[in-house]
Amino acid sequence: MLTNTWALCALWVGLALAATLLAIWFKISTALSEIVVGTVAQLVIGVFLAKEGLAGNTQWITFLAGTGAIVLTFLAGAELDPVIFKTKWKEASIIGLAGFFGPFLGCTAIAHYILHWAIMPSWLCGVALSTTSVAVVYAVMLELGFNVTEYGKAILAACFINDLGTVIALGLIFSPFTVRTLIFVVVSIVVFVVLPFLTPRFFKKYGGRVSELEAKYILFFLFAMGGLAVWAGSEAVLPAYMIGMVLAGTVGKDHSLIRRLRTLTFGLLTPFYFIRAGSFVSVPALMAAPVTLLVLFLAKSLTKAATVYPAVRIHKYDGKAGAYYTLMMSTGLTFGTISALFGLNHQIITQAQYSYIVGTVIASAVIPTVIANSFFLPRHLLPHSQANKKAEQEVMRPVPAEEG
Amino acid sequence: MGSPVFVGIQRILVAFDASPHAEHALDVALSMAGDMKAKLFVIAVIRPPEPAESAEFHAVLDEGRERYESIFVPLRERAKQKEIELETDIVLGHPAEQIIHKADTIQASLIVMGKRSHTILHRWMLGSNSERVLRYAHCPVMIVH
């Protein structure tokens, strides 16, 4: 049955549908639901129906999943607020780089010296666990109204720097550094400089038609730069994230275009990406060595805390306002799984190591949220620190009827 | 002229999630606010999926804001016709927490909310918003069935 393209497609889309329903019922992110459904479906189908399971390495599935990762990364980059970034770049750089280098170097060392992984899998582990979920931080900031405070803006911008560090590390550490790498870097710089000027003018002249010129234009640059990156031995999501960031002030503000890209992404592409990422997780490997999972989770959390905490203190933010920067420990599912999949596809890590890394990514995305909801609700009734009070004084919560 | 029981109820907060129960709660609150000459506050809470993922989170946020804003337009007309002072607010977060916080901020005299029927599994996993509000709110809470 799995050689029949349409039957296989129906199976994957059916799983995506089931994952979406589960996400709605349990109010969890669709990405998380799709990863888990992918893992379970691979296990069940592999045991009872077909040896190859979901056939996640079929070429067209790989293409759709890869495109999903690229567009998702682009959208993540396009969420950057350039105005905030310009005003807060110094604090953001220090906190963001600390948030990246801490877990990156710490998890690499722990994977190598404690888990006795070889050096390349250890580097990959460090990259995958160095991310911060911008969305988790932003959600809590919005919830408490801190997104409009100076403190909130700095932390938010720091998350982008953190993820930029992850993407650059993924794109360059495993690159062979040949003439091709140099060509890729030079062409990338030219494209990143030219795009913010070219794009709005091009869209103004030819955009706004039913032929979706804007979407084709963006996809062209994402695929072209992705192709160049892969040719140079790098990773396609690196230019995608950078293109998203440089176009955040123009394309990122075009809500209609972003919404159309989201429809394409959520409706077709990301289910293939996340289900595929989940399908490579080996449940037997996870069950065989749960301590490995625990070690990696602690490594990620402790190294992130150990480096972000002093960086925040340098900027005289009260340490007790820690809910916000400790949230930086929460891993983004997108960048975490992209890094792990890159390692698996390039045979840098084994399937068991991939399973531990993805398991840790999921745990470090879910556990902070579960703890926060179980023990820190209602958050507004918690004892306030001085920094919290100061931050709250800055907050202007909108209530007038005209604004909704 | 208001009933003696409700003397002092000047600020009514309605928790609105666009469900039929919430619509009913809103009708009740509008009627009460009209009778008691109370100011009506309506809060709609957008709950992000957890853990939030960038593109999906922003999509949920945009969709929620647009949805509630479109619902609030005719509501404002209804309130205007009944000469009820109305304020609406769309916030993000855990519904129970945001309702309690809003009630504190505006010093609500009464919270009105609809009761949603959840499965045992749903209640075990996520808890009931009305139960949480009842437990933590500083003012009386009316649950409309």
Image: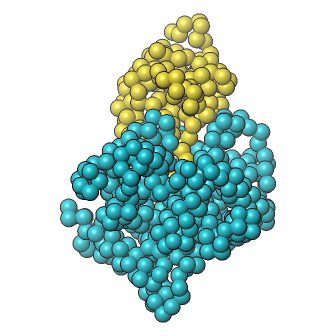
Chain colours: A cyan, B yellow
The x and y percentages for residue A35 are 47, 50
- Residue lying farthest left? A210
Query: Which residue is pictured at 24% across the width and 64% down the height?
Result: A212
Total labels drawn: 0
The x and y percentages for residue A79 are 48, 61
Residue A306 seen in the current view:
yes
Residue A325 seen in the current view:
no
- Residue lying farthest top? B4
In the rendered view, does B102 fall on the left or right side of A320? left
Query: Which residue is pictured at 56% across the width and 57% down the height?
Result: A355
Query: Which residue is pictured at 58% across the width and 54% down the height?
Result: A285
- Residue lying farthest bottom? A179
Of residues A167 and A93, the one nearer the viewer is: A167
The x and y percentages for residue A56 are 38, 59
Q: Residue A356, relative to residue A70: is it above or below?
A: above
Asked where in the image residue A231 lies, by quadrant, the reply is bottom left
Q: Residue A19, relative to residue A246: is it above or below?
A: above
Query: Which residue is pictured at 66% across the width and 50% down the height?
Result: A290
Of residues A296 and A251, the one nearer the viewer is: A296
Of residues A326 and A19, the one nearer the viewer is: A19
Q: Residue A200, relative to residue A300: is it above or below?
A: below
In the rendered view, does A3 fall on the left or right side of A145? left
In the rendered view, does A21 fall on the left or right side of A317? left
